[in-house]
Image (cartoon, rainbow, N blue to C red):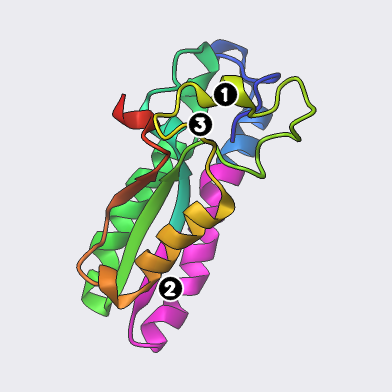
Amino acid sequence: MLWKDKDRGVLETDGTQWDRVMGINLKSVFWVTKHGIPHLRAAGGGSIILIGSVSALGRLHAGPGRLYRGKGGLISLNKSLAIQFAKDGIRSNVIIRGSSRPRCKPPTSPTSCGPSSKTGIPLGRIGQPRDIAYAALFLASDESSFMTGAEMIVDGGFMAQ
């Protein structure tokens, strides 16, 4: 989670801010998987699909406050889940998404994901919810039965630059 107006460096971040960011980005996923995995085991296996962000891959870590994001931890948790539960027929993968609607503000907003935001995306457009949904459908399907512990980047080519 990134709050550009509240993003601070390590020395300026207090414990409450740290806990909130980690709670949203990482601890919430821990609790969902902790309580969901027994149901997947009982069903004979399944697919865990986590949603991450390109910010975890370092491209957006230019500012001082980017150090405390839990998105990088999500990738590590994904790999841990993949290794721990492969024997149970449970796969875990993470979709690393780039800029997408509806996270972008309405087009009338001066900070919307309008034409100026698209210049950094090789495919020339902001992602749509369906772009992430199609990736999730693939990861949930038998077509991805040999994938676990992977990061699927869905960002219009942003990270390829």
Near-viewer residue (130 or 18): 130
Q: Residue at x 24, y 70 (%)?
A: 86
- What residue did someone put label 2 on? 37
* CB within 8 Å, label 3 to label 2: no
Residue 155, compared with residue 41, is above or below; it is above
Tell me the distance, in whole angstroms, between the alpha carbons under discs 3 and 1. Answer: 22 Å
Q: Position of residue 138 (x, y in %)?
A: 37, 66
Q: Residue at x 71, y 22 (%)?
A: 111
The quarter of the picture where the C terminus appears is top left
Residue marked by disc 3: 69
x%, y% of residue 88? 27, 78
Q: Can you give x and y, in whole percent of width and height, for residue 7 in the image?
A: 62, 20
Q: Give whichever of 141, 57 is nearer the camera.
A: 141
In this rendering, the answer to whether 130 lies above or below 99 is: below
Residue ranking furthest to the bottom: 43
Magenta-tinted stretch? 24-49
**Which SS type dominates the magenta stretch?**
helix
**Residue at the location (37% across, 77% down)?**
46
Q: Is residue 69 left or right of residue 150?
A: right
The secondary element bearing badge 1 is classed as: helix
Circle 3 Cα neighbour tier, 10 Å, few/some/many (<14 / 14–19 / ≥20): many
Residue annotated with mark 1: 117
In the image, which is nearer the foreground, mark 1 or mark 2? 1
